[in-house]
Image: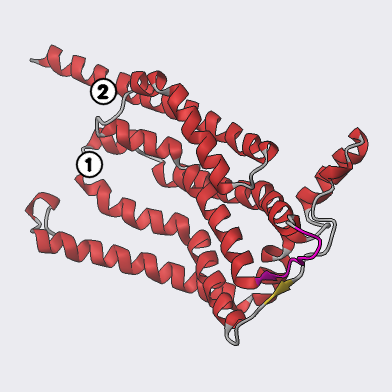
Amino acid sequence: MAKNEEEMSFLEHLEVLRWHIMKAFLSVFIMAIVAFIFKDFIFTTVILGPKSPEFPTNVFLCEVGKMLGILKLCINSLPLEIISIKMAGQFSMHIMVSLIAGLIVAFPYVFYQFWSFVVPAMHSKEKRYSRGAVVYSSLLFILGVLFGYYIISPLTVHFLGSYSVSPEVTNQINLISYVSTLASVILASGIIFELPVLAYFLTKAGLITPEFMRKYRKHSLVVILVLSAIITPPDIFSQILVSLPLIVLYEVGIMISNRIVKAQKKEEARREKEK
């Protein structure tokens, strides 16, 4: 019979954590191998997609621009040359992109492994309230990744790829720079979309309350605008586009925090009655 959680020593807990971490790394490694094999799809279709005029977002914005008579909305219409200036540049980038793709695809399982380590330490009611945490966290992360890829990436590529300080200077974008920019935007979006999950855990830990979040709503708006400015090109349209879902996520975080606080108060009232 396996030992009860309370009977496990510190080293035994470390051993359990080690196995969860190994399983998480193994899942990322397997998905990275799959991504490495499907090189043409990953690079030609996914990585280089946002710079193409045929990319869904670029096509949609161009159609809207034609209807409104705003031709500037036809973004990424000019060819963007991507070059590699290092001997092993393309190979090393192939490995890096495969690892990033592996992490994104395996994220639900990775989060599940860490969640499996934390859950046994929870009380039965905490487990009930946190049911579905893996699903919700994974869904939010995937939505953030999709938002970063389909909304922010083409805008970023267009702005930075077409920006010019002088007609004498030609943009020849290094592959490493292009992929790094795209990866940082996509992963940052995925992490930022975890805001409701962060609000849940911070409320459970007693670090924040819905009143606290409402009080500092204006301050959070400033932080959101700063974050939007960091992960998007420096134009007001892109920043507003990114800020809107973040503001919605903050409000969702307030609702989640409020629900947890109410549940905690009910539990405290029930305990008082039982005394």
Give the farthest residue toward the top. 273
* Upstream in sequence: badge 2 or badge 1: 1
The residue range painted magenta reads 166-174
Would you name the residue on which mark 1 appears? 122
Give the residue at x 45% y 73%.
29
User: For the residue labelled by badge 2, is the local secondary structure a helix, a strand or a loop?
Assistant: helix
Q: Nearer the viewer, residue 67 or 22?
A: 67
Q: Is residue 134 left or right of residue 231?
A: left
| Location of residue 87 with respect to 54 vertically, above or below | below
Asked if the residues shown at circle 2 and circle 1 are in contact, with their CB atoms under 8 angstroms apart, the answer is no
Give the residue at x 10% y 57%.
8
Viewer can see residue 252 = no
Marks 2/1: CA–CA distance:
15 Å
Q: Nearer the viewer, residue 272 or 144?
A: 144
Q: Is residue 256 left or right of residue 147?
A: left
Percent coordinates x, y for residue 14 in the rendering: 17, 62
Quarter-of-image position of residue 22: bottom left
Percent coordinates x, y for residue 71 in the rendering: 89, 43
Amino acid carrying label 1: it is: Met
Viewer can see residue 191 = yes
Give the residue at x 26% y 31%.
207
Q: Is 224 included in the stretch rendered in magenta?
A: no
Percent coordinates x, y for residue 5 in the rendering: 14, 52
| Location of residue 45 with respect to 195 vertically, above or below | below
Mark sitting on residue 264: 2
